[in-house]
Amino acid sequence: MLQTQTPRTLKTVAQKSTLTITDITAEAAKLDAFDNHERVWHGRDEERGLNAIVAIHNTALGPGLGGTRVWPHETFEAALTDVLRLSRGMTFKSAVAGMDFGGGKALIIANSKTDKTPALLEAYAEMLAALNGQYFTGEDVGFTVADADFLRERTPNVTGTTVGGSGNPSPVTAHGVFLGIKAALKHRGVATLDGVHVAVQGLGSVGWTLCEKLHAEGARLSVTDIDATRMEQAKDAFGATPVALDDILKVNADVFAPCALGGVLSAENIPLLGAKIVAGAANNPLVRHEDARLLMERGVLYAPDYVINAGGLLNVAAELAPGGYDREATMAKVAKIPETLTDIFARAEAQKRPTNDVAAEIAFERINAARQR
Ligand code: NAI
């Protein structure tokens, strides 16, 4: 368990604004997903359609950094659970990747295709500005580079913009995942992607680029997406085999690469998993942290999500470094993702522990050392 830090303050929202920001940390603390998060805020603006939560998990290493997800959760509790889990994951992601940032994440409860109006984004920009530099955001599911650019014109706490920033982080995330898949295969004695069968769930920004890279090195692809057109496009572009949503887990592939949303692997469906490696971009692919043990017992090698998908965070964080974004230095850091994974795989195997326990231990070591300093 991480410690709660000193309470933080907000800048006052301009008097004429219709936005209200409420500290809901105490309400969040009632949920299982709460893990001593430092602060959780709810931003509400009925007039402009904003219903957003910003969660700051831990800032021992630096200010909270993590993307904004736009997703139409059916209940507020489901949204709160999602953002609590995601922000916690960002703490670990930053720590393992050696970055001086803490864990933060935002969730706008809305349909990104129909509800994301300029008015809503204006209100959200006000909310970010009021958080006073405690949280830096960027892209996530439903939140695009164009959205980041829009916000950046209104508030400085935005990364992944094309306005003097590093742009879309997804290709960098995909590159890190691609290198991570190769590291997992290598750990299992497979030296080449040629003929390797990968089942990819989700053909969005990251999933699609990942498919391009895998296909270019001779991998065979089975794919699924809730958007059937994407599957048809993948069939044309990569000769991929489209698979029904519920069947992707069961595909007898070498690697299962979850690149859609989280919560896709559970005690119920892990026995049905066809692949012997799980390595993908999705945050929180396991319903419970403990499910990694079930994977281990089944002989499945799990690449912890926040280790393998850190490329995008490394890319956007580089914007905030003194001197600004340096692509070469960033890609050199991304190239270390397979090394970190290989170390985690080896330690986990030697100690007969799940890989995500070993990864968490590495994160805690850094966070605790920072706290002691
Ligand atoms: P995206 O929104 O571009 O793509 C997600 C894709 O998954 C969409 O094509 C969507 O139709 C599909 N999808 C949604 N539910 C599905 C389901 N039940 N079954 C199959 N397909 C489904 O998102 P993006 O940026 O590609 O991110 C993918 C995952 O990777 C997310 O979990 C995200 O949090 C994570 N991630 C993304 C990073 C980035 O740089 N974009 C960085 C680190 C993690």
Image: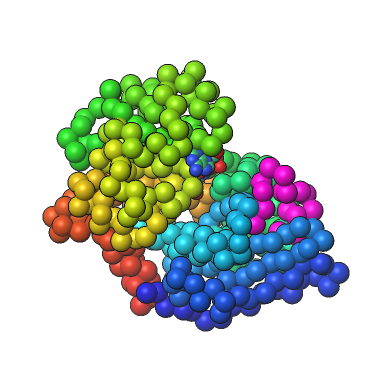
Question: Where does residue 169 sit, x and y in percent of width and height?
Answer: 52, 42
Question: Where does residue 52 sit, x and y in percent of width and height?
Answer: 66, 62
Residue 204 horizontal side relative to residue 294, left or right? right
Which residue is at a point 46% across and 59% down the rendered structure image? Answer: 90
**Figure colour scheme:** rainbow
**Residue found at the very far right of the displayed protein:** 16
The answer to which image quadrant residue 13 occupies is bottom right
Q: Which residues are magenta?
A: 109-124
Q: Is residue 176 magenta?
A: no
Which residue is at a point 33% across and 72% down the rendered structure image? Answer: 369
Residue nearer the viewer, 180 or 292 = 292
Residue 137 horizontal side relative to residue 177, left or right? right
Residue 300 horizontal side relative to residue 225, left or right? left
Which residue is at a point 32% across and 55% down the rendered structure image? Answer: 267
Report the quarter where the C terminus lies.
bottom left
Question: Where does residue 356 sit, x and y in percent of width and height?
Answer: 30, 57
Q: Is residue 114 magenta?
A: yes
Is 253 rendered above or below residue 237?
below
Is 6 rendered above or below residue 31?
below
